Amino acid sequence: MRVPQIGNLGFFCMTKYKKNVSSQKILKNQNDTLSFSSNAKYLKKYSTLPDEIKNILSPKDAIDMFKDMEYVAQGKIKRDDIGRGTDSRVYDSPWLDDYCFIILSGKNDNDTKVVYSTYTLGDAVWSDKDDSHIQILKKAS
């Protein structure tokens, strides 16, 4: 199957027209859109994870985890937090037992944040390069 060039993608939905009508009068359908979803950015994030997490997490599960973290950060998914600070919320990760993720709100200018949690939290082991407000923390206990 031959794929059309990117410039011609808008011409998939053509309407019937009379033969004597010039092709310049045929307009693109404004309501039809084409969307391509790609997991390439999530696979790129997976390559930045530490080796200790890569040994536990498969790439398919990592894609689901990254999408879930983004949706929680954007407020599309509501989830119960296991800890909170003045500018942060900590959430349990169903994919990683010994890790959780934190979503920082506000300015991220300090290296140290005070977070009250039901777990003893360690340092951040991973930070999202696209959105530094999302980080993965290791549970100390």
Image (cartoon, rainbow, N blue to C red):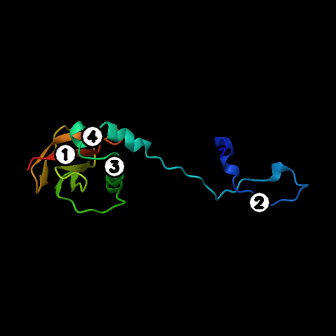
Q: In this rendering, which labeled residue sits more in front, label 4 or label 3?
A: 3
Q: What amino acid type should be assigned to the residue bearing mark 4? A: Ser
Query: Measuring 24% from the left and 37% from the top, which residue is drawn there?
Result: 50
Q: Position of residue 87 (x, y in %)?
A: 22, 50
Disc 3 residue type? Phe
Would you say the residues marked 1 and 3 are in contact, meaning their CB atoms lie under 8 Å apart?
no
Q: CA distance from mark 4 to mark 2?
A: 49 Å
Q: Label 4, label 3: how many angstroms apart (C-alpha)?
A: 12 Å
Q: Which residue is mark 4?
A: 127
Q: Residues within 10 Å of mark 2 (few under 14, many from 20)?
A: few
Q: Nearer the viewer, mark 4 or mark 2?
A: 2
Sequence-wise, which precedes: disc 3 or disc 2?
2
Left or right: 14, with 128 as reference point:
right
**In the rendered image, which residue does mark 2 sit on?**
15
x 79%, y 53%: residue: 26
**Residue at which label 1 appears:** 137
Q: Earlier in the sequence, mark 2 or mark 1?
A: 2
Q: Quadrant of residue 109?
A: top left
What residue is disc 3 on?
A: 66
Which residue is depicted at the point 10% across and 57% down?
A: 118
